Image: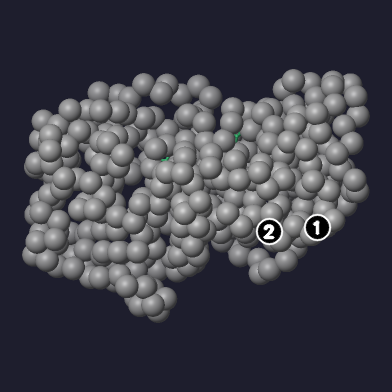
Amino acid sequence: MKQGRSRPSGTPQPTLTRRSLLIGAGGAALLGASRSTAAAKRGSHVAVIGAGVFGTWTAVHLLRSGHRVTLIDAWGPAHSRASSGGESRMTRAAYGKDSIYARMALDSLKEWKALSLHSGLPIFHQSGVLFFFPTNDAYARDSLAVHKQMGLSTQALGATEMARRFPMIDFGGVEVGLYEPDFGVLMARRAVQTLAGTFIQSGGTYVTGAALPVQASGDSLKSIRLRSGQQLEADAFIFAAGPWLPKLFPDVVGRRIQPTRQEIFFFAPPAGEDRFGPKALPGWADFNGGDLYYGMPDIEGRGVKFARDTHGVEVDPDTQSRRPTDEALANVIAFRDRRFPLLRGAPLTEARVCQYENSSNGDLLIDFHPRLANVLLVGAGSGHGFKHGPEVGRYAARRLVREGEVEHRFSLASKSEVHRREVI
Ligand SMILES: Cc1cc2nc3c(=O)[nH]c(=O)nc-3n(C[C@H](O)[C@H](O)[C@H](O)COP(=O)(O)OP(=O)(O)OC[C@H]3O[C@@H](n4cnc5c(N)ncnc54)[C@H](O)[C@@H]3O)c2cc1C
């Protein structure tokens, strides 16, 4: 990993212990050397709350640009209930007309590959990604046009060609597919935990602690209070709390982000069968007339992954049951048996219940708090955010020092309380 490389040699190195971060309840924690009423200056102390993919990459980019960074999480990087805590996440550049996300996915891929090179076990599997459609619709056409402009080697395939190359899939009712050979699958939990490890090795401070909802009266935030009663002071704060963001900022974020229940299932391929591994089966999505299903190959023997992408019921990430439902399992099996006939009867190996944290249309949120000039809100991954982690972190770190162009689509102002999904 490269982080820390750009640290000025004179930058104070935070110690890796909690001692440097917290002074006991009632004591004054004086971690921020200077205060700014606006965004943080370079070299200042930034607290990042939330060690999911967004918070951890943001912390890494801040460290690279010479800040003193404390990363805080209530349960740890990519823990079981975090949106980033799943086994695997797809990375792809097919985004219809939304070239902004195609570009972010491509730029992020370089960082993921670099991280994968330096981790003990792979973080990126270049399995390729195949999206297929009942008709050559606008999403498929627009994706291809964007990819041509970007010089990507995406291939448009007809059903016959797909059936030849991917014989484990029944392409009945499918007219066209887009195959992206350069993309594939990210090992999500491993990626974030590896990144958090390199963040610490590079001089960042990680602390387990739960931030309480912010109480601030002025135009900037001086400290946050943790559930333990301790105070943490910093020059600037970045809240990357994923599906917990509405609970931390009920007045500002509130219903602009809605967490929904999502269930994922893994099935064992037939014994001795190698057509479901990442060398043969790409990550895939079946647009299926608007009722999208997606999945990933059998990676590291966990099973072939299947999920329905439709937003589930709205949930609270703290209290939703993590027990999969028979109904969701039956639904996925019905799809699997139709599209992947070789997997009929395949035993369930694992199931997970997670949550998307959806903005009104699927655009990400990376913007300042409307009243607190040194508080940045980062989130709304909306079921597609993981792959963009490196670029989200880069953009957030630059926004904090008011550098770079402002992307309106990431603004709080663009987020409505009325939800209509547009970014897929
Ligand atoms: C089932 C599923 C499938 C998905 N598939 C894909 C995919 O294929 N490709 C893709 O690119 N994306 C995908 N996504 C989306 C992607 O995983 C998420 O957008 C991304 O992980 C969100 O990361 P985050 O850092 O915003 O949130 P999280 O990972 O949830 O991290 C937020 C962190 O904040 C911490 N936190 C919250 N409140 C506090 C507090 N008060 N104090 C301290 N810490 C706090 C939490 O403990 C948590 O660790 C999928 C998501 C799901 C659920």
In the rendered image, which residue does mark 2 sit on? 5
Residue 273 visible in the snapshot: yes
Q: Residue at x 24, y 53 (%)?
A: 279
In the image, 271 versus 117, the foreground residue is: 117
> Quarter-wise, where is residue 175 in the image?
bottom left
Identify which amino acid the numbered label 2 is placed on: Arg
In the rendered image, which residue does mark 1 sit on? 9
Residue 93 percent location from the top left of the image: 39, 63
Indicate the secondary structure of the residue bearing disc 2. loop
Q: Give the Cα separation between the discs numbered 2 and 1.
A: 9 Å
Residue 297 percent location from the top left of the image: 26, 45
Q: Residue at x 9, y 61 (%)?
A: 164
Query: Which disc is residue 413 wearing?
Result: none
Q: Residue at x 29, y 34 (%)?
A: 302
Residue 366 visible in the snapshot: no
> Quarter-wise, where is residue 136 in the image?
bottom left
Residue 317 percent location from the top left of the image: 51, 29
Q: Is residue 314 left or right of residue 372?
A: left
In the image, 37 versus 370, the foreground residue is: 37
Q: Is mark 1 within 8 Å of ligand 1?
A: no
Residue 55 percent location from the top left of the image: 61, 45
Identify which amino acid the numbered label 1 is placed on: Ser
